[in-house]
Image (cartoon, rainbow, N blue to C red):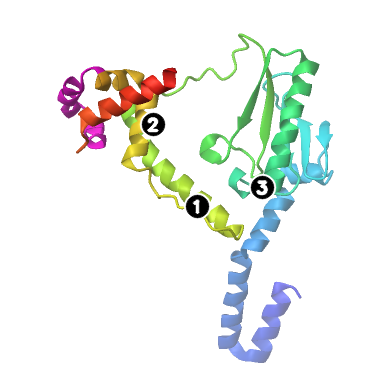
Amino acid sequence: MSFLSHARRLSEGLGYHRFFIGMISHLIDMADPTPEEQEEMIKQQCPFCRINRKEIPSKDVYADDKIMAVLDINPAAKGHTVVFPKDHHMLLPQIPYETFSHMFRKTAKLCGVVRKAMLAQGMSIFIASGGAAGQQAYHFTMHLIPRDKGDGLFQSGIKKITPEEIMKLKAPLMQHITARVVQAYKQAGKQPPNVKQQANQEEQLMNLLNANPQIRDLIIQDPEKFKSILPQNPQLAQLFDGMNLEELANFLKKKTAGDQR
């Protein structure tokens, strides 16, 4: 029944007041589709879903029951190939584990095939998950781009991050990674391991020393001198707060001697 017919029937049989309520409810239903309806509308318009349904022509490179690989219509280089799951998944975290594993196994083989076919010196695998990362379609894709030395691609530069900034980033990263691990164990019906939501002081300290051997060597050689420079670095001062540097120096000496055997 059309909207006008529905409105006329309501106005004739139910009176103005009930007609008005019915009309407003109908408009709300039309303007506010359910999540399932929204997802279906996105699928119908998604170019990669349409490629899978053969509604858009494509130059297919590979296809099986889970994924497809096609040549990009706006290639960054000759042989630029786009790999995507056949089922509609907008972002990387939404892809089921089985599909994810299958996709990456096949991508590894496709990289070798494309590289040999294009006589390329290397390959770049580009993933954009989210609009801020450069994702342009509401369908997860992986781009396999043949590379040659001096081809001029991807020369925008990399933002440098200081060691202090890295230390600040590690704690929230570890917290979220731990939470996802626990969630995955629970979803699989397994008992999650006994992990902390944030890396403890000892773990952070050992990671820092492994990544910065000059700090480790200074502690071993002159713990008092290292202690004197801590106030100049608030992050290090917090990490080493309350720690006996003499005991740490002895521990590191023994560990270093054991590693060298």
Check whether the beta carbons of the residues at disc 1 and disc 3 lie within 8 A of each other.
no
Percent x, y of residue 259: 43, 22
SS at badge 2 = helix
Residue lying at 76% horizontally and 12% vertically, measured from the top left: 119
User: How far, Cα to Cα, is label 3 from label 2?
Assistant: 30 Å
Which span of residues is magenta-colored?
221-240
SS at badge 1 = loop
Residue lying at 50% horizontally and 52% vertically, measured from the top left: 193
Percent x, y of residue 121: 69, 12
Residue 258, compared with residue 241, is above or below; it is: above
Residue 15 shows up from this direction: yes
Percent x, y of residue 137: 64, 41
The residue wearing badge 2 is 207
Q: Quadrant of the N terminus?
A: bottom right
Badge 3 or badge 2: first in the primary sequence: 3
**For the residue carrying disc 3, how many other residues have a C-alpha within 10 Å: few (<14), some (14-19), or many (20+)?**
few
Residue 73 shows up from this direction: no
Q: Amino acid at mark 2?
A: Asn
User: How far, Cα to Cα, is label 1 from label 3?
Assistant: 20 Å
72 on left or right of 31: right
23 on left or right of 252: right
**For the residue carrying disc 1, how many other residues have a C-alpha within 10 Å: few (<14), some (14-19), or many (20+)?**
few
Q: Which mark is residue 193?
A: 1
Residue 249, by quadrant, is top left
Q: Which mark is residue 97?
A: 3
Badge 1 or badge 3: first in the primary sequence: 3
